Amino acid sequence: MKVLSVITCVTLTLLLSGCFLLAPSAEKTNRKYLPKAPYDAIIVPGVPYDGKHWSETMRNRVQWSIYLYKKGVAKNVIYSGSAVYSEYEEAKVMALYAEALGIPKEHIFLDPRAEHSTENIYYSYRVAKKEGFQKIALATDPFQLNGMRKFIKKFELPVDLLPIVKDTLLKQDLTEPTIDPSSAKRANFVSIVERQSTWQRLRGTFGQHIRWKEEDLKTKHLRKKYGDRIEP
């Protein structure tokens, strides 16, 4: 079983790498979707936090959201991510950084439920719908974003794409602000590594743990396939 898991993970990595190489560049994708701005909200997926400093990945995602907000591309930001690999809820940590960098609290929304990239998109989309947001975009690094194109297309989610443009990002002030992350700590935290096997986590990557709303399963085939995971 361990050998099978390794082979599956390697295969997945190769498939995702292939998708990335064949996908449009970040610049080209932004040229397609930026004319549709302003967006009511952008979705920013989380990344683990060590309790001391943001990682380069978190920095890039948060700073890109700051750039898009201050440029008027996005009116609101939805930060997404549960406490997955560390005791800190990723959405809350990113929100603390965003507020410290100038986004008013009333324009910051949270999805503290997602544990995988597909869940980042879907559960944040549900937050957006609840808030009455109509125009939504996913704003993250190109590798993650390109890996999610197929998921968005498969389920016909009305989510556009605004990948990070590195040259633009590097022109910003990327200094890490000081935050107090204590409010983002999850009580009684148990790491996903202890709760799920490698195979279960892989299934989660493909959206196999999502609890759907029936209205978002657009076809009879999808409603039948995911009928056992429809929430009331």
Image: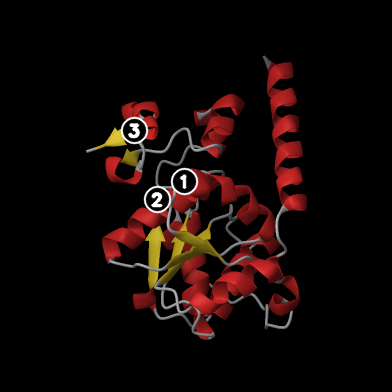
Q: How many marks?
A: 3
Cα distance, mark 1 to mark 2?
6 Å
Q: Position of residue 169 (x, y in %)?
A: 69, 76
Picture residue at 43% right of the left edge, 52% below the top: 157
First in residue order: circle 2 vs circle 3 = 2
Picture residue at 60% right of the left edge, 62% below the top: 140
Q: Is residue 157 above or below residue 3?
A: below
The one nearer the camera, 217 or 98, is: 217
Q: Residue 123 got which mark?
A: 2
Quick check: 25 left or right of 207? right
Q: Amino acid at mark 3?
A: Lys
The one nearer the camera, 165 or 34, is: 34
Q: Position of residue 67 (x, y in %)?
A: 58, 79
Picture residue at 39% right of the left edge, 30% below the top: 221
Quick check: 29 left or right of 138? right
Specify the quadrant that holds the N terminus: top right
**Can the viewer see residue 204 in this picture?**
yes
When asked about the image quadrant of residue 225, the answer is top left
Residue, disc 1: 119
| Circle 3 or circle 1, nearest the eye | 3
